[in-house]
Image (cartoon, helix red, strand yellow):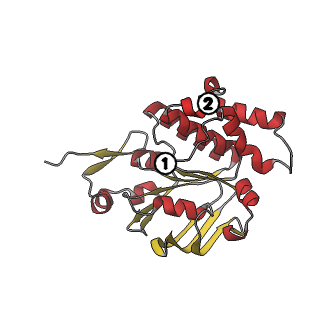
Amino acid sequence: MTSLRLRNVQAGYGGRPVMRDVSVDVPAGSWLAIVGPNGAGKSTLLKTMAGLLPGEGELLVDTHPVSSLSRKEKARLIGYAPQDPALPPGLTVTDYALLGRTPHLGLLSREGAADLSIVEDVLGRLDLGALAGRRLSTLSGGERQRAVLARVLAQRAGLLLLDEPTTGLDLGHAQALLELIDRLRREDGTTVVSTLHDLTFAAQYADHVLLLSGGEVVAAGTPGEVLTVPALSHHYGANANVIVTEHGELVIAPVRPK
């Protein structure tokens, strides 16, 4: 099980800070959703957590500073799925998913039966089994998104960083994907940090929510504490109701202004 700790983390591009003074603890086996309006710094924060963007402040995976880890060590601990990855068009879905096993292979080693079994299981869970032999260039947007997640899940990393994992997915596939991620979290103790535009999904799947606005943390806590009508109005400029279902789940419902 893998935990994540940030203290006063700041990062940006070209010397211009995009997000600053971010402090949060993500306990092992929990799910943190990072939400906020466009341009709030969500993807920048996720890249910094993954060690892909240099930042200032303290950033620990378990007790290890991310900056001190080698590329292979990061890949064993952290699985990162960007929102718009560059995909090699000539690879099949299976070949691409197998790239997720690379951190676990020795020098000059090739994937074995166990690696193929892991990939086959992941493809089945993501409803990609029938597309295993298809080239990435022939997939739809939603199918490509699931292929990216297949590669990340095949890493079997203790920490998953997912940037808008439901982008391009219809409602059914989005729910199935989030259910799979939550199952991995509960059964394997996987720790999940995801950015999510869909606030209802964030409220229903995450244990804790971090609300960014203008590059700063403006609220943090349980979904019910963070996703309030005043917060949605102030930071999103949105007219919305927060509805509690009979099962105690939150639904963020837009309301047309009168």
Nearer the observer, 206 or 144 = 144
Q: Could you tell me which secondary element the residue under label 2 belongs to?
A: loop
In the image, taking residue 34 as reference, residue 151 lies left or right, namely right
Q: Residues within 10 Å of mark 1 (few under 14, many from 20)?
A: many
What residue appears at the point 50 percent right and 62 percent down from the top-left corner? 44
Residue 6 pos. (x, y %): 58, 70
Q: Could you tell me which secondary element the residue under label 1 belongs to?
A: loop
Please tell me whether mark 2 or mark 1 is closer to you in this view: 2
**190 up-or-down from 226: above or below:** above
Amino acid found under the numbered disc labelled 2:
Arg
In the image, taking residue 214 as reference, residue 144 lies left or right, namely right
Residue 129 pos. (x, y %): 64, 26
Query: Label 2 belongs to which residue?
Result: 135
Distance of mark 2 from mark 1, alpha carbons? 23 Å
N-terminal label among 2 and 1:
2
> Which of the 4 image quadrants contains residue 116?
top right
**Quadrant of the frame with the N terminus:** bottom right
Query: Label 1 belongs to which residue?
Result: 164
Residue 255 pos. (x, y %): 23, 45
Amino acid found under the numbered disc labelled 1:
Glu
**104 up-or-down from 12: above or below:** above
**166 up-or-down from 228: above or below:** above
